[in-house]
Image (cartoon, rainbow, N blue to C red):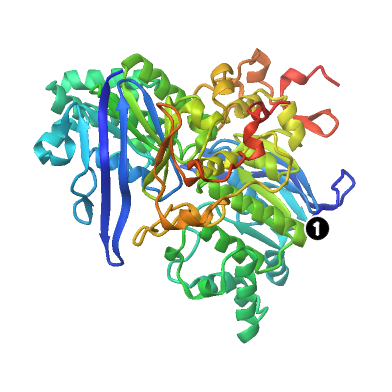
Amino acid sequence: MQKILEVKDLRVSFHTYAGECQAVRGVSFHVNEGETLAVVGESGCGKTVTSKAIMKLLPEPPSEIKEGSVILFKDKNIVNMKEKELRLLRGSEISMIFQDPMTSLNPTSKTGKQIAEGLMIHRGMNKKQAFEEAVKMLETVKIPNARKRANQYPHEFSGGMRQRAMIAIALACNPSILIADEPTTALDVTIQAQIMDLIKELQKKLGTAVILVTHDLGVVADVADRIQVMYAGKIVERGTTDEIFYNPKHPYTWALLRSVPKLSTKNKSELYSLKGTPPDLVSPPVGCPFAPRCEYCMEICEEAMPYATEITSTHEVSCWLQHPMAPKVEVPNELMVGGEINGAS
Amino acid sequence: MEQAKITAETKDLIQVKNLKKYFKVGRKSILKAVDGVSFNIRKGETIGLVGESGCGKTTCGRTVMGLYSATGGEVVFDGINVHKLKGKEKKDFTRRAQIIFQDPYASLNPRMTVGDIIASGIDIHNLYTGKERMDRIYELLNLVGLNKEHASRFPHEFSGGQRQRIGIARALAMEPEFIVCDEPISALDVSIQAQIVNLLIRLQYEYGLTYLFIAHDLSMVKHISDRVGVMYLGHIVELTSSDGLYKKPLHPYTQALLSAIPEPDPNTARSTKRIELEGEVPSPINPKSGCRFASRCRYAKPECYEITPELKEIENDHFTACHLFNDVK
């Protein structure tokens, strides 16, 4: 598989009154052609900042992409690109859908026009051609009465439909990468299922690579090819979907997996919950950022940052527990039984 | 901690009888948000109310609280009709019943300190003053897992989960018997959701609270509720014990809702096929007669479009409103 995007040592900081907030602290990863990469973590772990940095959508100042950061897209470094080049890239090569479909569409412009806009700029279509194409896109994302809908304003759409319209805008120019930043968080479960199925289906049809950003591991199980778990601006574990779900190595991944609600747990029993909050990134800890919340914390964890250990060629984890001298730690019981998650039994 | 077992014989705290709430939209149209809903809530019980956006679950919760006046039907709280209350009695009722709102960002006044927010009910009802009042605030903060120093801070200094805790503390300040939880966790991260649900369950055990828990996420509702009602376009289509609902969902809508829950196991997720629910909830403005779900139902028969099915007991304590079960019992 061809690497289409490669991020090397990405560091992003925000300059605030309190000091420099290091939101992303040295993140490296790649995206292959046509695959789905899920980025998972809690609020404030830097997953949205990472995805916005790829499109250079972060305002500078207050943000700053640190020197030495490299974002290679088709062998060109996005970090050094001029605004003019970026404009050619955004929407046509890389596009993005956002968490909140209510606020990310322009309320004063008809939906069809908003889809057509990108087509006119990037594909050089005239108004009429672009509008026809926009209607086709609305049909592709399964909006009924597409022609009528194209002439309506976003406020006439429901939440799920707006997210569909967002997807239509994002995919109109057939980009190579689609960044979906929590695309279903604001939606109902039923609509969430519809939107995830739609993204999956369109990806197969168009061969777009998808970077799916979410806080819910449950959502990505049947969508993602690979998963990377972020915590406090760093990637703590990455692997294929099966590796993350069936052979997780990092205590934080365990915690995330355990907090996914299961239908099989006994009613009103204590649910597993991760204590505490992520560290303040204005003064990030010297050691492992997860150490204060980790059940298995050792002395070294607070003193030095763990390095990445390779488990397989695709599976990598940054945790001192992987060190040969570390005590053996059992994976929490409830994660061992894969079939137990089945609710019906 | 074990809770006293709730059985069918446990006394009802709340009875909702054929509750209706219509809103006028425009000159001729009527939006029937809640259209003839009946259920009871036993003392110390948690009733879950689930459904998609726009199905009327929030309106139902607010009407039960008396925040909206009912168009028809009644809500009886411990023998008194909530919608007929006036003056002192009404004030007394508002102390006994409280609500926790969905959006922890919008439901706290940004210009008030956390202490004043929590104490607003205490001040209105003149429960405590001076040092006692401050002690009560600290006690409440401690109860929901925040600390003393937080009392003098402002809401913007807190994360979503912490804000929801403040909302819970505000509701608890009145020592209520009944709390409506209106989607208290849907704006939060998965890892924080568990914390809030654990807190609510613990408080229920400690204070014998009765909850009406509104949400669209079935897995959490199942966990916290004793019984669950599934709402669709202003009607309750299925009502039963939470275990019964998940083991044997009867109504086609419930089956679809259950199947939409994301499967956190890659192998099962790849092999199972979802029951696809086409389209979205139709408009509740001037709804057609017949089963409201008929237009999206896989099993819809001609009669479904004409006759509105009634909520009937199919099995012991398992109610559903669907023509498919006409012949049963």
- Is residue B35 visible to us here? no
Whether residue A10 sits left or right of residue B2 in the image: it is: left
Residue at point 72% right, 20% down?
A: B323
The local secondary structure at tag 1 comes to: loop
- Left or right of A20? Residue B100 is right
**Given the image, on which type of amino acid does mark 1 rest?**
Asp
Residue A131 x %, y %: 22, 22
Residue A175 rendering spot, x and y as whole percentages: 25, 24
Q: Against A305, is B270 above or below?
A: above
- The answer to whether any part of residue A324 appears in the image is yes
Q: Quadrant of residue A56?
A: top left
Could you say which is closer to the camera, residue B184 or residue A6?
A6
Q: Is the C terminus of chain A in the top left, top right, bottom left or bottom right quadrant? A: top right
- Total numbered badges shown on the rendered structure: 1
Q: Nearer the viewer, residue B282 or A188?
A: A188
Picture layout, residue A225 above or below residue A107: above
| A164 or A77, nearer to the observer | A77
Q: Nearer the viewer, residue A35 or B128?
A: A35
Q: List x then y, in percent, for residue A55.
A: 23, 38
Q: Would you say A259 lies left or right of B19 here?
A: left
Label 1: chain letter = B
Q: Quadrant of the N terminus of chain A?
A: top left
Q: Residue at x 40, y 54 (%)?
A: A304
Q: Where residue A291 sits: x, y (%)?
A: 49, 54
- As drawn, the residue found furthest toward the bottom would be B130
Badge 1, how many Cα within 10 Å: few under 14, some, many 20+?
few
Figure check: B136 above or below B328: below
Give the quarter of the image for residue A208: top left
Residue position marked by numbered label 1 in the rendering:
B78
